[in-house]
Amino acid sequence: MYRVDPQQAATAQADKRASNGGAKRVLSSAAEAIINAPAEPTVSGSLVVGVAQVVEALLLTVLGYVIFEIYLQGEQRGFYVALVFGAALLTNVLLNIGRTHRIAAYRTIFTQISRVLLGWAIVMALLAIGTFLFKASDLVSRIWVLSWFASGAALLVTYRLVLRAFVMRMTRQGRLKRRTVIVGGGKDAEVLIGQIRQGADSDIRLFGLFDDRIDDRSPEMVAGCPKLGTVADLVEFARRTTVDLVIVSMPLSAEKRVLAMLTQLWVLPVDIRLSAHMSTLKFTSKAYSYVGDLAVLDMADRPISDWNLVFKWIFDKVVAVAALILLSPVMVATAIAIKLESPGPVFFRQNRHGFNNELIKIFKFRSMRTDMADESASRLVTKDDPRVTRVGKFIRRTSIDELPQLFNVLKGELSIVGPRPHALQAKAANQLYYEAVEGYFARHRVKPGMTGWAQINGWRGETDTIDKIMQRVNHDLYYIEHWSILLDMYIVVMTPLSLVSKNENAY
């Protein structure tokens, strides 16, 4: 029978406090050794995939434009630029649907290239059909289409072979392995480890196992892999060292164990897979994804990965630089006003939780009197709060006090859009946020942002009730689950409008 460590219930509250920046949970010596070991040089698989997609789309776009200049010499340039860009983007979408932009796919030859050529042929066929249906044969040159199709196919094959060579080299060097742990133990985990070593050794760097069982069914060593702790320990472990993948070695029939495990782990920005090696239920091959040759069921994915990481990084940097340039007069005037009204520094730095609960120091314009500053934000700012200066009241209501966080964006600690980072000791109804809302730390699966979905929907400013912080967290989780670049753009556009129409709670 499954048993939980009897100390687990007693230490649950301590675990929460530890994750809020207090004393760290004590891990096993084996886990500490992994955390403190010198970092091996690795290349992020998500980054490789993201860059590979962007480069491929750019190469197709440039090729289409070059062929246009050769054959048509600048005629109807705007129309052809739009056509080339649209076709390259559609190609990228189709190749993603065909799952060709995966590290595992990059290692293949026939499967990868056949799918790539099929996708490219579909795009060219759609281009030809569109030309016929919209009677645009006078606008679209047949020579250009055929030349781009043939040269594009050659380019894609060459590019994919070069990409495969790069990925295989990184694989041999062990630089593309996903840092992986197993949840579970005993004989079932032993079988799983054997399958990983047989079919996924080039993909996986296996650290060890985490299991809540404390009896002889969960020994301290399984197939040469050490038991590193409990599932609660895994949360702390994943926050102190990089973990890319969690493979759960539990049968689907153990519903309560699986749900209990997910309740603890869903706050982490990791991929979680349930191994199918123990299941007596058999699904079609399309229902599974694979870790090497190991069939797994997808239980959770990191929210933003692959090329989306690249696009969000570019979006953050471009918007931050543009905002600093455009808003520099406002920032200079604010700094002067702060210095003229009260003595003390212009900027205020405060610890906040960043991505995966890492502590970061964010910049703000000082809005309080220096002798009344509350660095831990243990007391909420209320209407007509005597600690806030006259300039402070204005810059807080208009969110001008947040503008220095553009420097945090450039440092990579914040995003332009994301869940707002809360002060460590912030409370609602005299309860710390993470105690008031179950799953609160799930909002840290992505980088925090200067503005977010909660803010443009009116959930900014004072959070004096549990309902208010719950609404804010629910909006943050909605944003994480539905993220897209278009959503980020929408939030950026709506932020100044919301500051005018929905600022009644900002003091």
Image (spheres, rainbow, N blue to C red):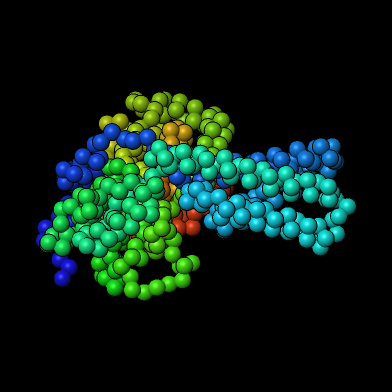
Left or right of residue 485: residue 251: left
Which residue shows up at 70% across the image and 39% down it? 62
List x then y, in percent, for residue 356: 34, 46
Seen from the viewer's position, the closer of residues 373 and 355 is 355
Q: x, y percentage for residue 201?
A: 36, 49
**Residue in front for this viewpoint, 47 or 453:** 47
In the image, what residue occupies the spot 41% across and 45% down?
Answer: 447
Location of residue 89 in the rendering, given as x and y in whole percent from the top left corner: 65, 50
Residue 268 visible in the displayed image: no
- Residue 476 falls left or right of residue 219: right
The quadrant in which the N terminus is found is bottom left
Report the front residue among 362 and 214: 214
Residue 322: give x, y in percent of width and height: 57, 34
At a point 12% along the width and 62% down the height, the residue shown is: 215
Residue 192 as seen in the image, left or right of residue 168:
left
Taking the spot 49% from the left edge, 42% from the top edge, the residue there is: 167
User: In the displayed structure, would residue 16 be above or below residue 256?
Assistant: above
Could you tell me if residue 208 is visible in this image?
A: yes
Horizontal arrangement in the rendering, residue 21 relative to residue 276 (left or right): left
Query: Could you say which quadrant of the image residue 280 lies in?
Result: bottom left
Total marks in image: 0
